[in-house]
Image (cartoon, coloured by chain):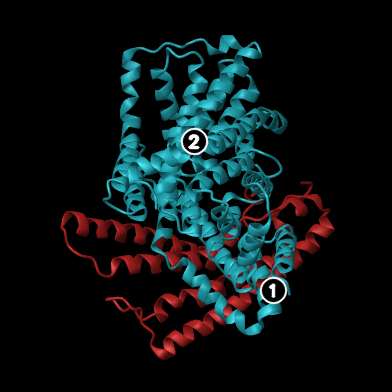
Chain colours: A cyan, B red
Amino acid sequence: MDPLLLGAMVALATIFVLFSGISVAIGLLVVSAGFLIAFDGMRSLELMPEIFFGKLDNFALLSIPMFIIMGASIASTRAGADLYEALERWLTRVPGGLVISNLGACALFAAMSGSSPATCAAIGKMGIPEMRKRGYPDGVAAGSIAAGGTLGILIPPSVTMIVYGIATESSIGRLFLAGVIPGLLLMGLFMAWSLYSTWKSGHAAAMDKASYSWAEKIEILPRVIPFLLIILGVLYAMYGGIATPSETAAVGALLCLLIAMIIYKLWNPRDLWVVLRDSTRESVMILFIIAAAGVFSYMLSSLFITQSIAEWIGTLDVNRWVLMGAINVFLLIAGFFLPPVAVILMAAPILLPIITTAGFDPIWFAVVLTINMEIGLISPPVGLNLYVINGIAPDISLRTILVGSLPFVACMVIAILLLCLFPGLATWLPDAVMGVAR
Amino acid sequence: MAGQSSAAVAQTGRNPFLRAVAALSTLAGWCSAAMIVTAVAITCQMIFIRFVLNGSTIWQTEAVIYLMVAATLIGLPYVQRLRGHVNVDLIPLMLGQRARRALAIITLSLSCVIVGVMLFYGYDYWHFAWKRGWTSDTVWAVRLWIPYLALPVGFALLLLQLIADLVAVLIGADKPFGLKEGM
């Protein structure tokens, strides 16, 4: 059978199976097994456990549970609230300091946790009620945190970037660096929109400055500086050539747990177990999808589907930017329904050859892909961050949260366009720190 | 991903089989968490030896990898019990109670079949490594049946939890897909 037709059948079958409500990982195994039996015979099933194990047999994967533990232990403390409070106390001279502080705290928290819902919950719990109390419109309060939370998967360390690095065999260190400038750019765009819409909707009074004494400014520092030091330490260890991302992550995880226990007094075994349980759940879920997606991509390449699609796209005489546009639409739609990790693992083996043939940089593409996934996090029907906000502030309707988030989606689209116009936004920093990639 | 926000932990009611499986899965979850913690500790020890004592490390990297693989496989049933394996529950949410129940029975049965296949061939793979005395081609030369053991054990426990979930839907101890009625 023509591999292209077979590819279309696999795509349809995958959509059909995943929409049945079966777990993503198990669904991928079902589709893989089905096609392997049909086109390669029963014997090919023998290989499935071996490939499954082989996918997990990789030291780089260790960084996933480690960064998740790091994020979960910080998220279990008041650190998120402390971060934004510290920023607010120090940014008193800036108009709209509160919303600026919240977004800044989201970015900083993202730099520690690598997870979007965790960032959203940690900052939003204190940030949203405070913004509403000071008279910011509900839509801005909810939308800014929903959007700010998505920075979690763009600003390093990012679990999504690790997964992309593993799926495409790209350097995780380089991917992390590529996310920094676009992350800050997005943060800036979010801030600009929040201030503009607050001012425009006649809530300018909310932006009045609060004032804090120096004692108040100094007093909060001991609670946030340790975490900032960990971020710096992790970055130094990773880029100073001292340790691999996995090793750095393990030390980071240990330090964050210790800080949570010492500074935030998290030594009740029950609380510690919650941190461990949540980390285990999240890690096992992601690693299961990684292993199952490994079997899935083995099926794709053993039936020559991956290769044929790349070849076919190569023969099409389309403009590379039209191609990039089409890929973006595809990613966006996939991101509306599936968690980022699943999209990356399923799409990367097919998209990567296409991307490189068309002359795009895979590191740059990782950033574009991640921003697409961020849009999915704050769009219906399964925008996870919207539900997190709904959980924190149940009296703001889902509709208000959604409408409040839409302009931030526009900010993300602008960021993608800027990245297409100026690819250096993503590639300059990794090249400057780690040397130009060959 | 909405599955995590709208579905609750699997319910067991008073059924002794469901409760026994739930307890077993929870135990597996503790083992999985313990293995992750051990992996953190070993990695930190390895870094200490390498960078502080300037020594060389032999077994640590490999041990950490096998611990992570085992933590993943042994953790599967626990995460299934917590309903932590993400799914797309858009269609189940749109269906009525009866259709939703039917769909849950179909997807759970299908899951049991595929996990059964993985268990069968996973056992085969492990048995091969054991019978032939395979070792890893590193200095440490681990007997590979030890890490491979996680394949049959993990999938067997996952199969058990999936069967329990199916039974729970069939006897009405739990809601299909863990979704509340009226959602």
Q: Residues within 10 Å of mark 1 (few under 14, many from 20)?
A: some
**Res B18 visible:** no
Residue at the location (65% across, 60% down)? Answer: A23
Q: Chain of mark 2?
A: A
Where in the figure is residue A77, as x and y percent of width and height?
A: 42, 38
The relative height of residue B94 versus residue B21 in the rendered view (above or below) is above
Q: Nearer the viewer, mark 1 or mark 2?
A: 2
**Dot 1: element:** helix
Q: Nearer the viewer, residue B91 or B99?
A: B91
> The residue under label 2 is which amino acid type?
Pro
Residue at the location (41% across, 81% down)? Answer: B145
Which image quadrant for residue A433?
A: top left
**Number of marks drawn:** 2
Mark carried by residue A182: 2
The answer to whether dots 1 and 2 both sit on one chain is yes
Where in the figure is residue A62, as x and y percent of width and height?
A: 40, 58
The relative height of residue A53 versus residue A195 in the rendered view (above or below) is below
Where in the figure is residue A136, as x and y percent of width and height?
A: 59, 18
The relative height of residue A96 versus residue B95 in the rendered view (above or below) is above
Where in the figure is residue A151, as x and y percent of width and height?
A: 51, 37
Q: Nearer the viewer, residue A218 or A306?
A: A306
**Dot 2: element:** helix
Q: Chain of mark 1?
A: A
Which residue is at the far bottom?
A: B131
Q: Which residue is mark 1?
A: A34
> The residue under label 1 is which amino acid type?
Gly
In the drawing, does residue A55 fall left or right of residue B60? right
